[in-house]
Structure formats: C-alpha cells, structure tokens
C-alpha cells in the first residue's frame, strides 16, 4: 500500500506531484493495466476452426478471381 502524507507548508500541487511520482515508481499502474487488458488464451479448437474458415474463404476468393468476378 502506498501512503503519502502532506509535509508542513507543502502545497497541494507539490503533494499531488509527489504522489504521482510515487505511484509511477511503485509500478502499481503498470500492474493494473496488465490485469485490465490481459488477453484470454484461445482454445486449440477455436484456433483450428478459425484457420479452416480462413482457408475456405481464401479458396472461395481464388475461385471467384479465376472466374473473373473479382479483380
């Protein structure tokens, strides 16, 4: 836990700057962002289905290209 106390005759702006610096140095924000934006692992089955879908679409595109329907 991070605790910052106001010193005597310290302005709120300097207190806030000290607090921001302490938070950056502690690495709290970096850990929070890693947790917030963590990507889920995709299952093998889902990866396989996506690969098969891409392959099917690629073949369909090539077929239409050969027929001249797509430039």
Image (cartoon, rainbow, N blue to C red):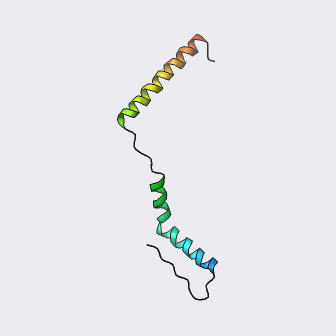
On the image, the x and y values in percent for residue 58 come to 50, 22
Asked if residue 39 is positioned above or below residue 44 in the image, the reply reads below
The residue located at (53%, 17%) in the rendering is 62
| Residue at the extreme left | 44
| Residue at the extreme bottom | 8
Locate the N terminus by quadrant.
Answer: bottom left
On the image, the x and y values in percent for residue 12 come to 62, 79
The residue located at (48%, 61%) in the rendering is 30
On the image, the x and y values in percent for residue 16 come to 59, 75
Asked if residue 47 is positioned above or below residue 28 in the image, the reply reads above
The residue located at (51%, 18%) in the rendering is 60
Task: Looking at the picture, tell me which residue is in the foreground, 66 or 69.
Answer: 69
Q: In which quarter of the view is residue 66 placed?
A: top right
Q: In which quarter of the view is residue 51 placed?
A: top left
Q: In which quarter of the view is residue 53 placed?
A: top left
Q: Is residue 37 left or right of residue 64?
A: left
């Amino acid at each position: 836990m991070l605790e910052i106390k106001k010193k005597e005759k310290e302005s709120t702006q300097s207190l806030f700057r000290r607090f921001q610096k302490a938070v950056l140095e502690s690495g709290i924000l970096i850990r929070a962002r890693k947790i917030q934006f963590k990507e889920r692992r995709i299952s093998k089955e889902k990866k396989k289905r996506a690969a098969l879908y891409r392959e099917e679409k690629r073949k369909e595109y090539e077929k239409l290209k050969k027929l001249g329907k797509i430039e």
